[in-house]
Image (spheres, grey):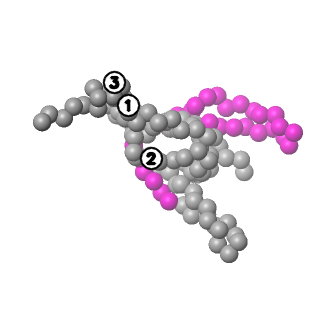
Amino acid sequence: MVATPLNQISGMPQMSATLNGWQNVITISVITQTLVDGLTVNSFVDTSFRGTIQPLKAEHVQLKPEGQRSWQWLQIHAVAGDLNLKNDDRIIYRDIKYKVMANKDYSLNGFIEYEIVKDYT
């Protein structure tokens, strides 16, 4: 029995081969919060994956009643199955804390896309 390639089964192009030339091994820390004796305790788990991280859009100054803020947005493309983040997860990348704002499951094409924003401090 000959295995049928996934792109023939799904009708979707396999982008993982295209992304291979752009990908690096990237390490982030995923932040998990738990309650211990009524106090919030953060734990950090380093996670490595193959992918790319690049700016999602231009950094703009947001005018808020509390003052001006600058928001940095990044886009992550990761090999499907290597990174399993959910909306509202917090991560640390290059010593900066980010919040996952969106995820797009293109696993039929071999990758996952995330949109993250620098978390408010």
What is the chief secondary structure element of the magenta stretch? strand
Q: Between disc 2 and disc 3, whose residue precedes? A: 3
Total marks shown come to 3
Crowdedness near tag 3: few (<14), some (14–19) or many (≥20) residues, C-alpha within 10 Å: few
Crowdedness near tag 1: few (<14), some (14–19) or many (≥20) residues, C-alpha within 10 Å: some
Q: Secondary structure at mark 1?
A: helix
Question: Residue 22, located in which quarter of the rendered image?
Answer: top left
What residue is pinned by disc 1?
Answer: 109
Using the numbered discs, state the Cα–Cα distance from disc 1 to disc 2 in whole angstroms: 15 Å
Q: Is residue 53 magenta?
A: yes
Front residue (pair 30, 104): 104
Name the residue: 24% across, 31% down.
5
In the drawing, does residue 4 fall left or right of residue 40?
Answer: left
Q: Where is the N terminus found, in terms of image quarters? A: top left
What residue is pinned by disc 2?
Answer: 83
x, y percentage for residue 41? Answer: 63, 67
Q: Secondary structure at mark 2?
A: loop
Front residue (pair 10, 71): 10
Please name the amino acid that badge 2 sits on: Leu
Name the residue: 40% across, 46% down.
82
**Residue segment shown in magenta:** 45-73
Using the numbered discs, state the Cα–Cα distance from disc 2 to disc 3 in whole angstroms: 24 Å
Q: Is residue 61 magenta?
A: yes
Q: Taking the image as drawn, is residue 36 in sight? A: yes
x, y percentage for residue 75? Answer: 54, 35
Please name the amino acid that badge 3 sits on: Gly
Name the residue: 61% across, 28% down.
57
Which mark is in front, 1 or 2?
Answer: 1
Please name the amino acid that badge 1 sits on: Asn
Label for residue 11?
Answer: 3
- The reply to whether dot 1 and dot 3 touch (C-beta < 8 Å) is no
